[in-house]
Image (cartoon, rainbow, N blue to C red):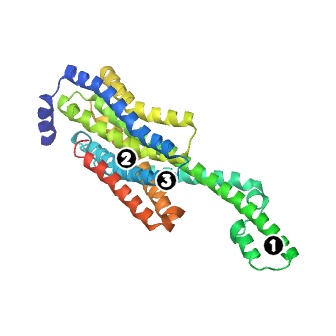
């Protein structure tokens, strides 16, 4: 309890409601603008490269950078903040918070729920795609080569015209089946990418609301002043992470704009909500109830983000992407992008 007393004495010298409110109003506009810049940059870049030879490679590199940002966000920003909130002296001195590591438990629950959503949605997509017939597009898919390969092999035989004609027809039939199968597989991958983007946005929105509400409830100008600059960079990199996933998912313009807008307004709305909560309840960011809510929501969103970063972004691209497995240069570039994303977000933890 001695540390609580010293912390209170230290924070009282920085408490100024009017100065804090002024800083919060500035932060709302600044954070909104930086959030828009962050999330729209990869989306606009992907639209610029669309249709060009480097499009697939560019989106893959952007997505790997995004994966690094999101992994660092969950492990270096969200989880430590949640742990600190539940271990604050105002909370950890009471039952049951001092008896059990709730931050780790709720993080695990978040990851397991993200897995459940992933499994349910994937099985739902697969059951719908399997309804078209025995194989994809009404043909049984036989992995014996493309149409051109089969026709080429048959023409090299220089056999009878009837034999060549029959083989070519078979090749065309198998080729059509393979093409339809490829289209169906591509549709499944695209639906999976969209699901990943949507679940990621849910986890990031949880995190953004917590950041905003915490700042909005705070009356400590010494805390808010450096946070404005730090959170601006934080939102740029986090926006780039989410924007990279949205860009690869290939949503329609309306859905893309809506998702970008929701990310951009969430933290400013959280700040406004925090200011309203303080004016109504008198709770500030050191209130035990506020700390418990911050710790539990932060832990839950951390679990979601850890699962999505490791399973649906990093593992999926590095181990199940054909472009990555067939091109060692692409693997190295993507790994460097991943490291750059995680490093840039980790450095920001010095300030926010």
Residue 289 appears anywhere in the view: no
Q: Eyeballing the image, is 52 above or below 328?
A: above
Q: Residue 127 lies in what quarter of the image?
A: bottom right
Name the residue: 48% across, 51% down. 59
Residue 146, horizontal then vertical, whole percent: 69, 67
Residue 6 visible in the snapshot:
yes
Question: Residue most toward the right?
Answer: 162
Is 9 displayed left or right of 151 in the figure?
A: left
Q: What is the crowding at mark 1: few (fewer than 14 residues within 10 Å), some, or many (at least 20)? A: some
- Say which residue label 2 marks: 299
Distance from the alpha carbon under mark 3 to that under mark 1:
37 Å
Above or below — where is 42 with respect to 225?
below
Report whether 311 appears left or right of 222. right
Tag 1 residue: 167
- On the image, the x and y values in percent for residue 60 come to 47, 54
> x and y percent of residue 220 in the render?
20, 29
Residue visible at 21% across and 35% down?
226
Q: Are marks 2 and 3 in contact (CB under 8 Å)?
A: no
Mark 1 element type: helix
Q: Nearer the viewer, residue 129 or 249?
A: 249
Q: Position of residue 58 (x, y in %)?
A: 46, 52
Report whether 229 appears left or right of 55. left
- The residue positioned 28% from the left and 25% from the top of the image is 26
According to the image, label 3 marks what residue? 54
**Tag 2 secondary structure:** helix
The residue mark sitting in front, 2 or 3, is: 3
Mark 2–mark 3 distance (CA, rounded to whole Å): 38 Å
From the viewer's perspective, is residue 8 above or below residue 155?
Answer: above
């Amino acid at each position: 309890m001695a540390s609580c007393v010293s912390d209170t004495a230290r924070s009282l010298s920085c408490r100024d409601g009017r100065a804090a409110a002024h800083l919060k109003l500035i932060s709302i506009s600044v954070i909104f603008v930086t959030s828009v810049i962050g999330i729209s940059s990869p989306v606009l870049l992907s639209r610029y490269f669309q249709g060009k030879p480097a499009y697939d490679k560019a989106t893959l590199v952007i997505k790997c950078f995004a994966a690094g940002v999101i992994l660092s966000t969950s492990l270096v920003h969200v989880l430590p903040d949640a742990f600190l909130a539940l271990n604050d002296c105002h909370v950890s001195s009471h039952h049951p918070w001092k008896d059990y590591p709730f931050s780790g438990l709720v993080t695990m629950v978040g990851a397991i729920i993200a897995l459940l959503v992933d499994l349910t949605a994937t099985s739902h997509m697969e059951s719908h795609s399997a309804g078209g017939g025995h194989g994809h597009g009404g043909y049984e898919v036989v992995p014996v080569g493309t149409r051109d390969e089969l026709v080429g092999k048959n023409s090299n035989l220089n056999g009878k015209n009837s034999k060549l004609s029959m083989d070519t027809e078979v090749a065309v039939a198998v080729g059509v089946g393979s093409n339809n199968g490829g289209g169906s597989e591509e549709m499944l991958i695209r639906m999976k990418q969209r699901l990943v983007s949507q679940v990621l946005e849910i986890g990031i929105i949880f995190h953004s609301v917590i950041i905003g509400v915490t700042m909005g409830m705070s009356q400590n100008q010494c805390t808010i002043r450096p946070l404005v600059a730090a959170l601006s960079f934080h939102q740029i990199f986090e926006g780039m992470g989410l924007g990279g996933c949205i860009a690869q998912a290939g949503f329609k313009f309306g859905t893309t704009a809506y998702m970008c807008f929701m990310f951009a307004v969430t933290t400013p709305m959280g700040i406004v909500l925090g200011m309203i909560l303080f004016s109504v309840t008198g709770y500030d960011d050191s209130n035990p109830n506020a700390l418990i809510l911050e710790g539990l929501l932060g832990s839950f969103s951390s679990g979601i983000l850890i699962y999505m970063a490791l399973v649906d972004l990093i593992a999926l691209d590095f181990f199940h992407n054909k472009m990555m497995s067939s091109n060692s240069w692409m693997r190295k570039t993507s790994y460097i992008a991943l490291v750059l994303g995680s490093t840039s977000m980790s450095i920001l933890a010095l300030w926010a």
